[in-house]
Image (cartoon, helix red, strand yellow):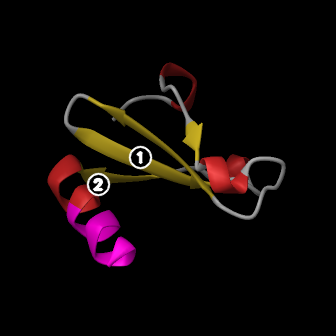
Amino acid sequence: MAGDTELHWRKAKASEGTNNCVDSATRDGQAYVRDAKDRARGMLAFGSASWEAMAAALQG
């Protein structure tokens, strides 16, 4: 698993200026997410295909 500082984290443009969202990053076929309000709690890792399927389902 990649370390937190080794990843390029992104936040949804709709959430700019707030911390009411998750940060996401991808690397080596993995997708990572963390709580933007409490980044010290760590991150979750998912296979990229699983993350893409979940994101597509949420977008409808």
Q: Residue at x 21, y 51 (%)?
A: 47
Name which of mark 2 and mark 1 comes first in the sequence: 1
Q: Magenta stretch: residue 4 in it?
A: no
Residue position marked by numbered label 1 in the rendering: 32
Q: Hey, which quadrant is residue 27 in on the image?
A: top left
Q: Residue furthest right?
A: 17
Rate crowding at label 1 as few (under 14), some (14 to 19) or many (20 or more) other CA atoms within 10 Å: many
Looking at the image, residue 14 sits to the left or right of residue 53; the answer is right
Rate crowding at label 2 as few (under 14), some (14 to 19) or many (20 or more) other CA atoms within 10 Å: some
Task: Give me the C-alpha separation between circle 2 and circle 1.
Answer: 6 Å
| Relative height, residue 29 to residue 52 (above, below) | above
Task: Say which mark, if any, is on residue 10.
Answer: none
- Quadrant containing the N terminus is top left
Give amino acid for label 1: Tyr
Residue position marked by numbered label 2 in the rendering: 46
Looking at the image, residue 34 sits to the left or right of residue 47; the answer is right
Magenta-colored span: 53-60
Measured as percent of width and height from the top left, residue 9 is found at 55, 34
Q: Are marks 2 and 1 in contact (CB under 8 Å)?
A: yes
Measured as percent of width and height from the top left, residue 14 is found at 66, 55
| Relative height, residue 56 to residue 13 (above, below) | below
Looking at the image, residue 28 sits to the left or right of residue 40; the answer is left
